[in-house]
Amino acid sequence: MFPHNLTEGYRSFLSGRFPEERRRFKELATSQAPEVLVISCCDSRVAPEAVFDAGPGELFVIRNVANIVPVYETGGDYHGTSAAIEFAVVGLKVKHIVVLGHATCGGIKAYATKAEPLSKGNFIGKWTSLVAPAEAKAGDSSAPDYLTRLEHAMVSQSIENLLTFPFVKEAVETGELTLHGAHFGIANGVLLVRDPETGDFGPATDGTGRALRPSDTIACN
C-alpha cells in the first residue's frame, strides 16, 4: 500500500492548494524560472520550502547529507550535486545560491565522532569525508559548541567549493550570481546568515536591518 500519510496529504492538496494555484501549476508545466538555488541537507526536519515559505517554482533545491558541495572535478562516474548545480547556474541562470546548514546535523556529527559505518558500503562515511577541509575552520574540537561551529564551517567550505566550478566563478565575477550561507536552528527556528566579509553568522535581518527572530508571543485562545 502507498503510505497513508502521503495519500491523505495528496487528498488535502487536491482540495486546497491545487485549485487555489491551478494557474500557477499550469504555467510551471511548461517552464520554470527560480531565482534562488538552495543547497540544503536532506534531513527531514529542514525543508527549505517550509523555512522560506516558498511556493511551487520559487526555489531550485539540492539536498544531500550535510549540505556538502564537492570541489569541481570531472573524474569519477556520477556527480548528482554537481549536475544539479550546473543546471541551476548554466541552464536556469539563478541569481543566488544559498548553502543552508542546520543545527544537530547528523552528517556533521557522523564525521566529527568518526561514527561506525551503517552498511558495508559506508556511503555516508565516504561522503562526509568531504567535511575534512572544514575541520580546521571549526577550531577546538573539545569545545562545547564544536559541532555548531563545524556546521557553520561546512557552509563556508561549501561556498568556497562552489567557486571551484568555472561557470559559478565566472557568474560571480560578472555580478550575475551571488553566493550566501545560512544556518537554521531546528528547535528555536532561528535563521543565521553568513557575513561574506568575516564569515561570521548572525541573525537574518529585514530590509531595515532589524533582526528577524521567532516571536515570543503566545497566541491567546
Image: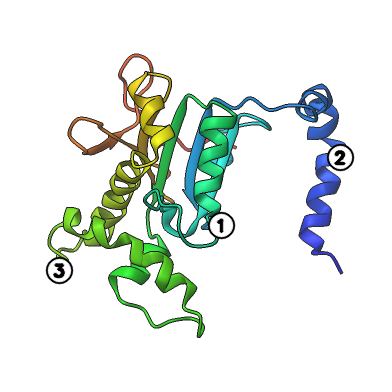
Q: Amino acid at mark 1?
A: Ser
Residue placed under numbered mark 3 in the picture:
142
Q: Position of residue 172 (x, y in %)?
A: 36, 26
Q: Amino acid at mark 3?
A: Ser
Indicate the secondary structure of the residue bearing disc 1: loop
Position of residue 2 relative to residue 154, above or below, is below
Residue extending furthest toward the left? 140
Q: Which of the image's four quarters has the N terminus? A: bottom right
Q: Residue at x 34, y 38 (%)?
A: 163
Indicate the secondary structure of the residue bearing disc 2: helix
Q: Residue at x 45, y 71 (%)?
A: 124
Indicate the secondary structure of the residue bearing disc 3: loop
Question: As rendered, which of 167 and 37 lies closer to the eye?
Answer: 167
Callout 2: 10 Å neighbours few (<14), some, many (20+)?
Answer: few
Tell me, for residue 165, which label it has, or none: none
Q: Which of the image's four quarters has the C terminus? A: top right
- In screen coordinates, is 75 left or right of 194? right
Q: First in sequence, mark 2 or 1: give its number.
A: 2
Question: As rendered, which of 6 and 100 lies closer to the eye?
Answer: 100
Residue placed under numbered mark 2 in the picture:
14
Q: Position of residue 113 (x, y in %)?
A: 29, 74
Question: As rendered, which of 126 and 7 lies closer to the eye?
Answer: 126
Q: Residue at x 50, y 85 (%)?
A: 120
Q: Quadrant of residue 115?
A: bottom left
| Cα distance between the residues tagged 2 and 1 | 23 Å
Callout 1: 10 Å neighbours few (<14), some, many (20+)?
Answer: few
Q: Position of residue 217 (x, y in %)?
A: 44, 34
| Cα distance between the residues tagged 1 and 3 | 28 Å
Position of residue 173 relative to residue 40, above or below, is above
Residue placed under numbered mark 1 in the picture:
44
Q: Quadrant of residue 143?
A: bottom left
